[in-house]
Amino acid sequence: MRCWIYINVKRIAIATSMLGIVSGSVGGCINIKQKSKSAVEIQDSRQKVKLRSVGILLGDLGNPFYLAMGKGSEAEVKKIGGDDVKVSVVSSGFDLNQQFNQIENFVAANTDIIILSAVDKKAIKAAIDKARLAGKIVIAIDAAVDADVDATISSNNLQAGELACQYIADRLKGKGNVVILNSIPMDSIIQRVDGCEKALSKYPEIKILSKNQNAEGSRDGGLRVMSDLLTIFPKIDAVFATNDQSGIGADLAAQQAGRKEFFIVGVDGGPDAVKAMASIDSLFAATAAQNPAGMAEKAVDIGNDIRHGKKPKLPTVLIPVKLVSRDNLSSYKGW
């Protein structure tokens, strides 16, 4: 007896040479029931896959800002997926080649979500493109990149520069000599300097003595650059440090040089800046405070939402900053 099996989505008709069309089992023919999955069902099954791993690439874990960011992201990942989710937080030390290798390692390890604070917004593009081509979710954090990422989460760094330098202009009453301690040319730093210059441009009697010296975003870098600037310029009225750590270094340089004629404003709102502002011996007067842990938590949440098919309404999320000075320090919770 010969039989042919015709599959028609949900039922199988068995035709024989001796009989008409019958259902079920006929002789040696097997009754087969099959149901095809729709595209929606396949999508639903993907969305139910648990989060397995998250890779977080930061600038320098010796900096309290990045340390807070790392801790915030770890806590949010555990909140979402529990202890079964693998979280890897790595530091590039602001080394581009190191960051390239770290991204490649996360891709090779089949990491679900990659959260990245890019060392160089343009040069990192090739590594990001490769990760995206491999199907990885890539979230830029703290600084934008010139690459196609799933989302960008950062502080409003233009606002940070404006707030800090408007404070400087107000305190100087629109007249004086200002030094800008620049840093590694990350997008966040570039925007802070742009914001500062925008604020100061309204005051023709404020002169920017220096704005291109790279203090490397570190205490040692701030100490080195500020020491040199103190030698060059006999009169400085205010210093804008593009992050708190370089501002702390500038404060130390002033102490070593016995200079007290100026004040320092930073960006971050970290514990070292809070401690300096609380000291009457410090020149550190104010900072544009960020929320690194909150920024990292938001990045993890958006990455997980994207993994489950929910894209953010806007591809870039800017988190406002707040100016903290000695005047309102007692009400600042810090991080």
Image (cartoon, grey):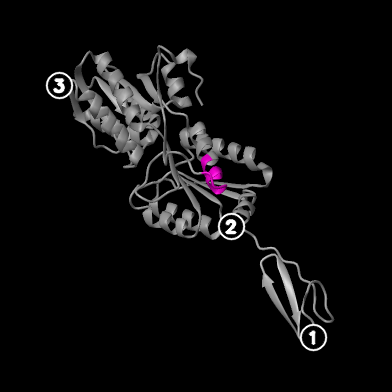
Q: Are marks 2 and 3 in contact (CB under 8 Å)?
A: no
* Residue tagged 3: 204
The amino acid type found where label 1 is placed reads Met
Q: In this view, does 86 lie to the left or right of 172?
A: right
Residue 150 placed where, x, y %? Answer: 45, 47
> From the viewer's perspective, is 222 left or right of 69?
left
Q: Mark 2 points at which residue?
A: 39
Q: What residue type is labelled 2?
A: Ala
Residue 267 x, y percent position in the rendering:
38, 28
Q: Which sits in the foreground, 304 or 167?
A: 304
Tag nearer the camera, 2 or 1: 1
From what the image shows, is residue 320 above or below residue 114?
Answer: above
Residue 141: name its quadrant.
top left
User: Which residue is tagged 1?
Assistant: 18
Q: Give how far apart the Cα atoms at labels 3 and 1 are.
A: 102 Å
Taking the spot 72% from the left edge, 78% from the top edge, the residue there is: 5
Query: Which mark's residue is nearer the viewer, 2 or 3?
Result: 2
Spatial CA distance of label 2 from label 3 is: 63 Å
Residue 304 is one of the magenta-drawn residues: yes
Q: Is mark 1 on a helix, strand or loop?
A: loop
